[in-house]
Image (cartoon, rainbow, N blue to C red):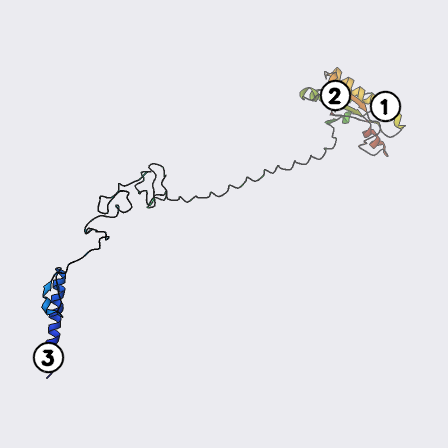
Amino acid sequence: MRTPLVLSLISAALVSVGAMNANAADGYFYDPSNVGAGVYKPEVKHSPDAIQVPSTTGKDINRTIGCPGKQILDKGCAIEDADKDTVEDWTDKCPNTPAGAKVNALGCEPEVAVVQEAPVAAPAPVVEPAPAPAPAPVADQPIMSFEDVNFDFDKATLRPTADAKIDQAVAYVLERNVEKFELRGYADSIGSEAYNLKLSQRRADAVRNAMIKKGAPADRIVAKGYGESNPIASNATKEGRAQNRRVEMYPGK
């Protein structure tokens, strides 16, 4: 019958441990192995060189540590914040921030992302338009052709039927703001070239004189003979040669 004996031993051990813990909590000690000693409070002996540290329960020692001249339980150091950014100097990584600047927990201004503006494209070079091609030279065209002023063969005398055409030419000159007009006289191909050149000059002069008599300004009319050049009809026929004995009016050069 060993079971009751085992239970008794376990119970006694538990009671002994509980008593020891309770007494130890109160500063007293009970040693079950030394029943004769009873309950006692052991004497705590300190070394003469030991530092006596008072209890710090409930005390604020964070700001005391590291403060010159402060004891461990003295009031902590005053908060030092040289740049007034609300971050104490001992944790301030940027101690010289401008007054009023917004700072982060390290006392530094938050970095502002720099937005790189896209480079402005250089304006495209202005391409000068190619100059317009020069107009093709206009064929030398007469302002007026005196169809009724054709001359007889080897003559430079105006026919009576030429008066109406002369009047028309004078009116044209007076109505236009043109500095000069040129009367060009021509001949057919019969005869020498030198003779026909002189004959054509006399025919141009005859028309000029008639126009001046009817009121055309002499300083604006020039007469010049061109001989048998520039025929307008064939010199192989009588009719063609009659057409080539003529005077035409052009703008002056």
- Mark 1: which secondary structure? helix
Q: Does the image show residue 29?
A: yes
- Mark 2: which secondary structure? helix
Left of 83 or right of it: where is 198?
A: right
What's the residue type where badge 3 is placed?
Leu
The residue depicted at 88 percent of the width and 28 percent of the height is 193
Question: Which residue in the rendered view is the most extreme toward the right?
Answer: 192
The residue depicted at 88 percent of the width and 26 percent of the height is 194
> Where does label 2 land, which residue?
166
What crowding class fits label 2: few (fewer than 14 Cα within 10 Å), some (14-19), or many (20 or more)? many
Using the image, determine if residue 128 lies above or below residue 57.
above
Q: Which mark is residue 5?
A: 3
- Mark 3: which secondary structure? helix
Using the rendered view, name the quadrant where residue 82 is placed: top left
- Residue 114, position as x, y percentages in the image: 43, 43
Q: Nearer the viewer, mark 2 or mark 3?
A: 3
Give how far apart the Cα atoms at labels 1 and 2 are.
20 Å
The residue depicted at 84 percent of the width and 30 percent of the height is 241
Q: Which of marks 1 and 2 is in front?
A: 1
What's the residue type where badge 2 is placed?
Ile
Closer-to-camera residue (112/143): 112
Left of 185 or right of it: where is 215?
A: left
Using the rendered view, name the quadrant where residue 89 is placed: top left
Q: Which mark is residue 54?
A: none
Give how far apart the Cα atoms at labels 2 and 3 are.
171 Å
- Residue 183, position as x, y percentages in the image: 77, 23
Of label 1 and label 2, which has the lower sequence position?
Answer: 2
Using the rendered view, name the quadrant where residue 236 is placed: top right
What's the residue type where badge 1 is placed?
Leu
> Where does label 1 land, which residue?
199
- Residue 84, position as x, y percentages in the image: 31, 38
Q: Does the image show residue 160?
A: no
